[in-house]
Image: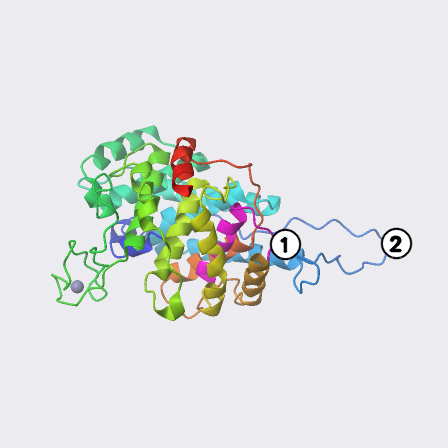
Amino acid sequence: MRVQTLYSGLLLTFALGFGVSHLASNTAKQEPNKRPVARNRVATAAPRHPLWPGSRFTEEDRDRAVHRALRFIYHTARNPRNFSDHGHDYLWCFYTTAEAMKDEKLRRTAWRMGVELARRWRARHPSVPRNADVDTVELLAFGNQTVGELGFADARIKKEIALAAARFTARDYLNFDPITEPPPSDVPAVCPKCGAYNSRGVTVCTVCKTPLEMMSRYGVWYEALIATWSGDLYGVKLGAHYADVLKWLPRMRPYRGREDGNNSDFYDSVFAVAHVVYTLNDYSIYKLSPALLPQEFRFLKSSVKDAIATDDSEMLGEILDSLKSFGMTNDDPEIRAGMEYLLSHQNPDGSWGDPTEKDIYARYHPTWTAMDGLSEYAWRGEGLSFPELKPWLEKWAR
Ligand SMILES: [Zn+2]
């Protein structure tokens, strides 16, 4: 999930609990022993299965790349500082990988990693801190929802979170109230100099006087989609319901392409549309009919070339798994081009993106989305996270 912009800086709350790094039993994974080769046979090279006729990459290459990616993410998650800052996000990565992927070995590995980290997360967050601010409450809701899925549900904390969550308004959580207005374009991004959050409409940081950039309305929208979807999933309202935020979809159309770099909203538009897909398909559990989201499907399909042209593995990964949800496969030229790109650009350490980047989110998140973009999914047929939204989508598609 891309909630980082909103939360970077306020996660210090979470850093405090860490002190001594109790690195629970190092579970550096040993692959299960390969089946022994029959004694009297000469071992031959493993069979190679091209991803498609003529592909220079094989299914084995893809599987290896995906497993290396998961190990890289796990390695960074075990760093106490990283886990303190992004624990809820890491948990979501391992949980959704274990739930959605087709590769059984990958699912099992991700589940083991997720359970280990969930145990750690639960120990670090035994209760809601007194006077917790809105962001702390929100991250506690995200994290508790996921650790619950991983087997560590806690009804008492959930009650505490629900009580704390009710103290805040939609504008506190989402920067706007989706009941009464569409995603706005006057929300300042976090101050690049001092990390302060400024009120809507403020253009110069009230703390350090640095000029502020505005978030795009697509950025505001997708953060609200994620927050409300997670809240509804958990059963604790975080300012508004998911449907209240999704209902602005017709107002966010049409999606403008990159326009040779002249559309500054392009990047957030792609992430917003990808998150419309994820929140509707329960993060790659269900296939979506392109007939329900025709403009979104066309926009993502046409953006593959831009993600490749701008060397944006993170964006490319989110586009590819979204397109796969719409039914595209390795038979489609866009999927082939994207998979070829990702398989040719994995870093030696198993990651994607800029290996010199200091911000750990910018290391593990592109790796996660690239892993998702390359993967095959265990689709459970066509479906929707909230089936009651189907008539809306049908109406909007006309
Ligand atoms: Zn500032």
Is the residue at mark 1 in contact range of ligand 1, meaning its CB lies under 8 Å from it? no
Considering only vertical position in the picture, is 139 above or below 374? above
What residue do we see at 80% from left, 59% from top? 44
Residue wearing tag 2? 40
Left or right for 18, reference 341: left
| Residue plotted at (24% across, 53% down) | 10
Answer above or below: position of 105 versus 154.
Answer: below
Measuring 22% from the left and 32% from the top, which residue is drawn there?
A: 163
Dominant secondary structure, magenta: helix
Badge 2 or badge 1: first in the primary sequence: 2
Disc 2 CB within 8 Å of nearest ligand 1 atom: no
Q: Position of residue 183 (x, y in %)?
A: 26, 49
> Does residue 324 show up magenta in the picture?
yes
Nearer to me, 119 or 280 = 280
Residues drawn in magenta: 313-332
Residue identifier under label 1:
331
Circles 2 and 1: CB atoms closer than 8 Å: no
Mark nearer the viewer, 2 or 1: 1
Q: Is residue 145 left or right of residue 212?
A: right
**Mark 1: amino acid:** Asp
- Is residue 116 positioned above or below 202 on the image? above
